[in-house]
Image (cartoon, rainbow, N blue to C red):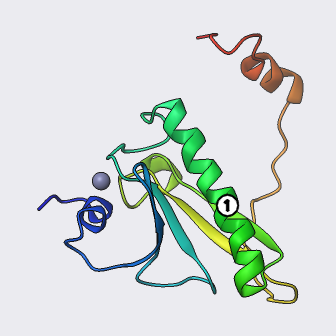
Amino acid sequence: MTNCVICEIVAGRIPSWIIYQDAEVICFLPKTLEAYGHTVVAPKAHYPDLYTAPEALLEHLIVAVKKLAIHYNDRIGSSGVNLLHASGVSAQQSVPHLHIHLIPGFDDDGLDAWPKFPALQYDKDELLEKLLLHEWNAP
Ligand SMILES: [Zn+2]
């Protein structure tokens, strides 16, 4: 027994509604559905967050998300998808095992998956100076 709920689901010690799994990823319905077809997509291996997961695994994870989104359009009539993810306490990550929430979108479902951010003004030139990335290996 671990103290990670997703690792427990992967190990089969917590029953779940598994939509798909392969050697690297597991896709399951969460205990509480936030929307019709709401699915959690996670690596089987325990990585706490986006920062710690290997890039090849992340590629596999996002391809699984894409395949599920297409599959859901076909099987339950969704026509769009929102992906929700949190890495880090400051981003409100509640389960410390990397995962992505796939929220299918349906015409006229009335769902608003975008948070209402306050309208803040930033000096974009100053921000650009901080964020500008010249190469992927930049520190
Ligand atoms: Zn875990």
Quick one: 67 or 49, which is closer to the camera?
A: 67
Question: Image check: 29 left or right of 67?
Answer: left
Residue 124 occupies quadrant? top right
Residue drawn at x 37%, y 60% as measured from the top left: 95
Give the x, y percent position of residue 127.
79, 26
Residue drawn at x 83%, y 55% as measured from the top left: 119
**Quarter of the rendering occupied by the C terminus:** top right
Query: Mark 1 — residue?
Result: 67
Question: Image check: 117 left or right of 51?
Answer: right
**Quarter of the rendering occupied by the N terminus:** bottom left
Report the amino acid beneath label 1: Lys
Give the x, y percent position of residue 123.
85, 30
Circle 1 SS class = helix
Residue 133 visible here: yes
Q: Is residue 133 above or below residue 33?
A: above
Residue 112 visible here: no
